[in-house]
């Protein structure tokens, strides 16, 4: 693949130039009994924060393959994607070289027992209206949209949001 940094510029601007590293990622929303599955991150970014399970796609891997793999790694659950909830872009202002494009899937559990995997300190279901205090902003907004469709800033028809945040792990 070569050195990706050779096309990265200090100052964005000229058309056709890469202004950072685009990081294709996935997230998985699994709801059971009005509770949403969250993982407590073991590693950076967002170490110690609760969030929707997920991670980066591997080269040659589809988004749906990536979320099945990530869920198994982080939670021990085998899942099936049943739809796309939305797409979120995370552009940390302090780390402009990183630009995450995250496909958020709605999932169904196929099998497995819930356990924290290698990338997670903990994995558990939380009532959707009572999330832990150290839950990331993007996760809070997605769960809020699930509770009150069309009332959050995620548009009910397309569910697309760009987050420009100070730090990747910002909370409210």
Image: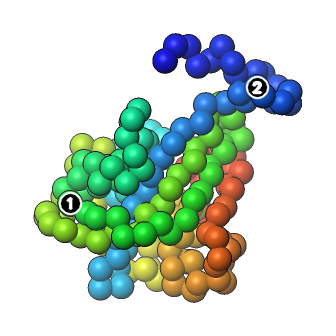
At x 48%, y 46%, the residue is 25
Q: Nearer the viewer, residue 78 or 117?
A: 78
The span from disc 2 to disc 1 (Cα, nearest Å) is 40 Å
User: What residue did someone put label 2 on?
Assistant: 17
At x 66%, y 13%, the residue is 6
At x 62%, y 18%, the residue is 5
Question: Where does the image place residue 54, in percent across and percent down from the top left?
Answer: 39, 52
Quarter of the image where one finds residue 152? bottom right
Q: Are marks 2 and 1 in contact (CB under 8 Å)?
A: no
Question: Where does the image place residue 148, in percent across and percent down from the top left?
Answer: 57, 86
At x 71%, y 51%, the residue is 164
Callout 2: few (<14), some (14-19), or many (20+) C-alpha neighbours within 10 Å? few
Render colour scheme: rainbow
Q: How many marks?
A: 2
Tell me if 84 is positioned left or right of 61 in this view.
Answer: right
Quarter of the image where one finds residue 113? bottom left
Question: Where does the image place residue 143, in percent across and percent down from the top left?
Answer: 50, 74
User: What residue did someone put label 1 on?
Assistant: 78
Q: Nearer the viewer, residue 55 or 64?
A: 64
Callout 1: few (<14), some (14-19), or many (20+) C-alpha neighbours within 10 Å? many
Closer to the camera: disc 2 or disc 1? 2
Question: Where does the image place residue 144, in percent across and percent down from the top left?
Answer: 55, 77
Tell me if 48 is positioned left or right of 145 in this view.
Answer: left
């Amino acid at each position: 693949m070569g050195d990706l940094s050779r096309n990265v510029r200090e100052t964005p601007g000229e058309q056709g130039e890469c202004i950072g590293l685009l990081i294709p990622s996935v997230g998985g929303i699994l709801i059971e009994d009005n509770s949403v599955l969250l993982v407590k991150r073991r590693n950076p970014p967002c170490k110690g924060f609760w969030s929707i399970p997920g991670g980066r796609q591997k080269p040659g891997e589809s988004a749906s393959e990536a979320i099945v793999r990530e869920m198994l790694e982080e939670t021990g659950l085998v899942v099936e994607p049943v739809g796309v909830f939305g797409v979120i872009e995370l552009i940390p202002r302090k780390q402009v070289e990183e630009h995450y494009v995250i496909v958020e899937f709605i999932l169904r559990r196929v099998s497995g027992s819930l356990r924290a995997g290698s990338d997670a300190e903990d994995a558990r279901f939380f009532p959707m209206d009572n999330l832990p205090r150290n839950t990331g902003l993007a996760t809070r907004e997605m769960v809020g949209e699930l509770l009150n469709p069309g009332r959050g800033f995620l548009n009910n028809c397309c569910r697309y949001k760009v987050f420009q945040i100070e730090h990747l792990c910002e909370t409210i």
